Amino acid sequence: MPKASSFEELEALIGYHFKDPALILQALTHSSFTNEQKINKTGNYERLEFLGDAVLELTASDFLFHQIPQIPEGEMTKMRAACVCEQALALCAKELELERFIRVGKGEEQSGGRRRDSITADVMEAVIGALYLDGGMEVSKTFIERFILSDLENRQMVKDSKSLLQELVQGRFHTNVTYEVVGTSGPEHEKEFVVQTSIDGQAVSLGQGRSKKAAQQQAAYKALLKLKKYKEA
């Protein structure tokens, strides 16, 4: 179990002090931990994740509607999807170092579950749900706008990484991008795929996700970042 100072540090990072600490504790608790400790299943983050997902989608919709009035409905739908997809939420969680505070069981810990995108993205939504219950819509909205909607261009790149990478590689190197599953991890019901991105036969990056498509998107995003650094150098 994390020390109390860990929660104080997280509260400092997100800029909010919980009136009910049990809510943030639940938001940070994976089912593997509750199963291992024989805690009632309602003690994990899954119900809060369900609530947080709805709050996130509404807040993102409201933000895009008011902040970018010139874009049509179809484009707003694409931008919202980019903001709330697993890869984008996992990136936000990484920027917050949220994985340091997640409670997982020993088996999940050993398999690297604490850093798994599928888990960190779910916990990000659970934290939103906890904020909503503890402080209301305005508190959760402030968190979402600060930590999720603050870099729309980068979030869009996460969602469209494969197509953006293909366009860039074809234009710059006149070749294609290939993806190969090089490994899997986790139990069958929560399997994670590891995918390698190669350009002209040269391995460039690795991505991980709960589906092959998600893993490919992450690998493509990492490749884009590398190519961007190469171009700027």
Image: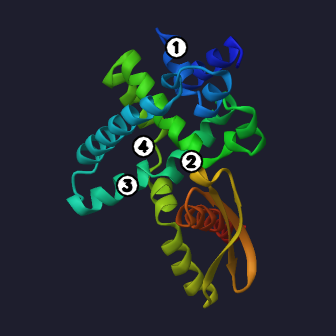
Q: CA distance from mark 3 to mark 2?
A: 16 Å
Query: In the displayed structure, does residue 21 sit left or right of residue 68?
Result: right
Provide the residue designation for mark 4: 149
- The quarter of the picture where residue 225 lies is bottom right
Dot 3 amino acid type:
Ala
Dot 4 amino acid type:
Leu
Return the disc, 2 or 4, that comes first in the chain's sequence.
2
Decide: few, some or many residues near mark 4? Use Cα within 10 Å; few <14, some 14-19, many ≥20.
Answer: many
Determine whether 172 is above or below 60 in the image.
Answer: below
Q: Are marks 1 and 2 in contact (CB under 8 Å)?
A: no
Provide the residue designation for mark 3: 81
Q: Is residue 73 visible?
A: yes
Return the disc, 3 or 2, that comes first in the chain's sequence.
3
Q: Are marks 2 and 4 in contact (CB under 8 Å)?
A: no
Q: CA distance from mark 1 to mark 2?
A: 23 Å
Q: Closest to the observer: 214 or 148?
A: 214
Provide the residue designation for mark 2: 118
- Where does residue 177 sit, x and y in percent of width and height? 61, 81
Provide the residue designation for mark 1: 22
Dot 2 amino acid type:
Ser
The label number, if any, that marks residue 11 in the structure image: none
